[in-house]
Image (cartoon, helix red, strand yellow):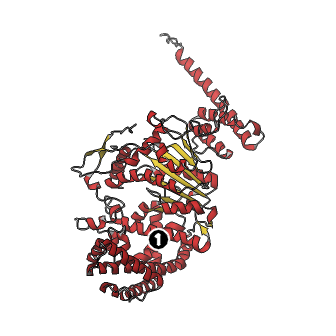
């Protein structure tokens, strides 16, 4: 039976001026470098290498999966700045919640950078890095003549030079390299070895100076712990999908279950780094385009800094990798080393995301590239699917929470699927929302040429949709079961794979609502919540919806009949009784008022006493 192809044409609001280059393509620096843009790419602005040399180098290596940013030798001042930002974002307390942090971090970097520049050792470290650059230029000079055996490098440096030579020859169809191609090998080797040595010098400098800066401004390092006691949170979701609002819920759950506060986690965020290397207010429509390559360089260094804690001391910080896609190498490493790995996947209808991004660009001057936005909404579900391949039979420390964020109400998102490696269960709470996520795997992302600033029509789904069984196949092979709380559409129920049609939660008596549903009515996402949190939530709920507070309180207490003697149960019982009494008085008062309004009043006599 052939799969049904869902035809869906959507109308997207896209500004021509908001469509520049794809977010993850380093080649855009070269392809569009000759365009009439007002500001230069930040990575080129701070490069020690002339533009024509970089262009020739890229031409040699662009088919070898080499990122353009790894061909650039940056000025010493910039690499020291990178080290500062990487350590500040990776190791220092900087924000209180998922919704707050960008402006605070910008201000912290501004202050810390000033302290670094004014330090008496700053010029000395710049001089040392420049000296390393000059020495490497001399050592690598034979490469320009095609002589790779005369290099006086250490073992690691020699190995790198030979590897780059092999890749250049392969890209040249195994023919002898030209003078231009040898020059490209020289530049790539120089950039790699120079950056490695410069970062080493900058790291030694910052290890000494950063604690002094933190002490001066009363800032704190993030708490560290043994690696096997730490948590790693990954996010995946398209641009403008509302990952932040879903992270707020996840952050609350992590705090309740693991006693880890949001401010005590290291936040790896490329968007925020873009605002550090380039002021988005200067050019809000192009800031990410101009700063993206340099921001990714800093993030790479930031992750290395966090990894050094583990390799050198066996310690780690709790981390959040806030990105569109999951980095598979880091995901696999986290599964093998961390106590708990949490994935927060956020789904939003693509058309809705475009409208949000367009509106956000107009109102907050935070523009999102049109092509990159489309691509990100396809990359996110495929990224999670690839992550499933990293699960093993004994994996038991991964939890995946999948949210639908199509609500027009700010902060509202629905949990539509959860995956637990401990119980080997895939719990589908809302099948229609799951299907919205799945169909993006085969989404059409070719935007085409834009003719005006108004609207653009695009057929998003012209390929056969993927089924849940196909999507979760790597997990099903490991013995995972899909549990539905709602039936999928008819085309997904006729599968050869055995699927259990049962509730996510254990069965309970029909007379008593399941605990997970009781907690959900109160606004909790988790199925296990400490009783003191329930007491707090009921008190909050009573201020806006006292009737619901009474109902939820009674339903919750119905599960606690064997614990009547505990302090919080008594408090909740007393609170519910008090609410019922107050509500009863209110109802009587309203009833009395209603009766008065319905009773005809006698007309005033024309003769008044």
Number of labelled discs?
1
Q: Which residue is drawn at 49% across and 56% down?
A: 100
Q: Where is residue 175 in the image (x, y as percent from the top left)?
A: 29, 76
Q: Which residue is drawn at 59% across and 67% down?
A: 316
Q: In the structure shown, which secondary structural element does the residue marked by tag 1 occupy?
A: helix
Question: Which quarter of the figure has residue 557?
Answer: top right
Residue located beneath label 1 in the image: 301
Q: Position of residue 193 (x, y in %)?
A: 42, 80
Q: Residue at x 30, y 59 (%)?
A: 21
Q: Residues within 10 Å of mark 1 (few under 14, many from 20)?
A: some
Can you say whether 45 is above or below 366 in the image? below
Q: Position of residue 563 (x, y in %)?
A: 76, 40
Is 337 positioned to the left or the right of 137 in the image? Answer: right
Question: Which quarter of the figure has residue 208?
Answer: bottom right
Assign the C terminus to one quadrant of the image: top right
Front residue of 66 and 170: 170
Is 477 positioned to the left or the right of 72 in the image? Answer: right
Assign the N terminus to one quadrant of the image: top left
Front residue of 225 and 583: 225
Q: Where is residue 209 in the image (x, y as percent from the top left)?
A: 52, 78
Is 7 positioned to the left or the right of 500 in the image? Answer: left
Is 579 positioned to the left or the right of 187 in the image? Answer: right
Question: Which quarter of the figure has residue 481?
Answer: top right
Q: In this view of the protein, can residue 15 be seen by the observer?
A: yes
Q: In this view of the protein, can residue 412 be seen by the observer?
A: no
Can you say whether 348 is above or below 151 in the image? above
């Amino acid at each position: 039976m052939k799969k049904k192809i869902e035809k869906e044409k959507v109308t997207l609001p896209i500004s021509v001026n908001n469509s520049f280059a794809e977010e993850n393509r380093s080649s855009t620096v070269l392809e569009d470098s000759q365009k009439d843009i007002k500001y230069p790419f930040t990575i080129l602005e701070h490069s020690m290498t002339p533009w024509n040399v970089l262009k020739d180098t890229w031409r040699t290596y662009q088919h070898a999966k080499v990122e353009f940013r790894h061909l650039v030798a940056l000025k010493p001042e910039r690499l020291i700045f990178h080290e500062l930002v990487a350590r500040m974002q990776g190791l220092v307390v900087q924000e209180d919640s998922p919704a707050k942090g960008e402006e605070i971090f910008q201000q912290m970097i501004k202050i810390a950078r000033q302290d670094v520049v004014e330090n008496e050792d700053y010029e000395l470290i710049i001089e040392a890095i420049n000296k390393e650059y000059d020495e490497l230029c001399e050592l690598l000079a034979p490469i320009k003549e095609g002589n790779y055996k005369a290099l006086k490098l250490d073992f690691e440096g020699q190995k790198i030079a030979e590897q780059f030579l092999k890749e250049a020859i392969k890209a040249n169809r195994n023919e002898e390299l030209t003078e231009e191609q040898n020059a490209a090998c020289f530049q790539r080797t120089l950039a790699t070895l120079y950056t490695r040595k410069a970062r080493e010098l900058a790291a030694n400098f910052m290890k000494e100076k950063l604690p002094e800066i933190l002490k001066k401004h009363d800032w704190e390092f993030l708490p560290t712990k043994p690696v096997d006691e730490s948590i790693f949170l990954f996010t995946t979701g398209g641009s403008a999908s509302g990952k932040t609002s879903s992270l707020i819920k996840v952050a609350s759950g992590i705090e309740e279950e693991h006693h880890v506060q949001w401010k005590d986690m290291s936040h790896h965020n490329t968007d925020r780094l873009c605002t550090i290397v380039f002021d988005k207010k200067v050019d809000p429509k192009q800031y990410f385009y101009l700063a993206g390559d340099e921001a990714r360089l800093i993030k790479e260094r930031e992750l290395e800094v966090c990894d050094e804690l583990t390799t050198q001391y066996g310690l780690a910080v709790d981390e959040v990798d806030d990105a569109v896609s999951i980095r598979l190498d880091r995901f696999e490493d986290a599964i093998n080393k961390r106590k708990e790995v949490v994935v927060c996947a956020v789904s939003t209808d693509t058309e809705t995301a475009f409208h949000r991004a367009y509106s956000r660009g107009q109102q907050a001057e935070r523009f999102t590239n049109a092509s990159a936005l489309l691509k990100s909404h396809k990359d996110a579900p495929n990224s999670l699917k690839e992550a499933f391949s990293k699960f093993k039979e004994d994996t038991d420390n991964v939890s995946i929470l999948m949210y639908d964020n199509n609500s027009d109400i700010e902060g509202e998102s629905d949990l539509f699927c959860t995956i637990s490696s401990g119980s080997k269960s895939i719990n589908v709470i809302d099948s229609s929302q799951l299907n919205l996520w799945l169909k993006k795997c085969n989404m059409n992302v070719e935007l085409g040429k834009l003719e005006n600033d108004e609207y653009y029509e695009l057929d998003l789904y012209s390929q056969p949709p993927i089924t849940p069984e196909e999507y979760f196949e790597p997990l099903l092979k490991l013995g995972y079961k899909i549990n539905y709380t709602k039936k999928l559409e008819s085309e997904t129920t006729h599968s050869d794979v055995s699927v259990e049609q049962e509730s996510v939660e254990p069965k309970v008596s029909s007379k008593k609502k399941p605990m997970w549903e009781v907690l959900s009515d109160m606004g909790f996402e988790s199925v296990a919540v400490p009783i003191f949190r329930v007491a707090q939530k009921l008190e909050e709920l009573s201020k806006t919806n006292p009737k619901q507070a009474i109902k939820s309180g009674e339903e919750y207490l119905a599960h606690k009949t064997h614990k009547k003697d505990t302090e919080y149960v008594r408090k909740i019982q007393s609170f519910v009784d008090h609410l019922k009494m107050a509500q009863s008085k209110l109802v009587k008062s309203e009833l009395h008022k209603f009766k008065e309004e319905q009773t005809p009043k006698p007309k005033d006599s024309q003769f008044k006493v």
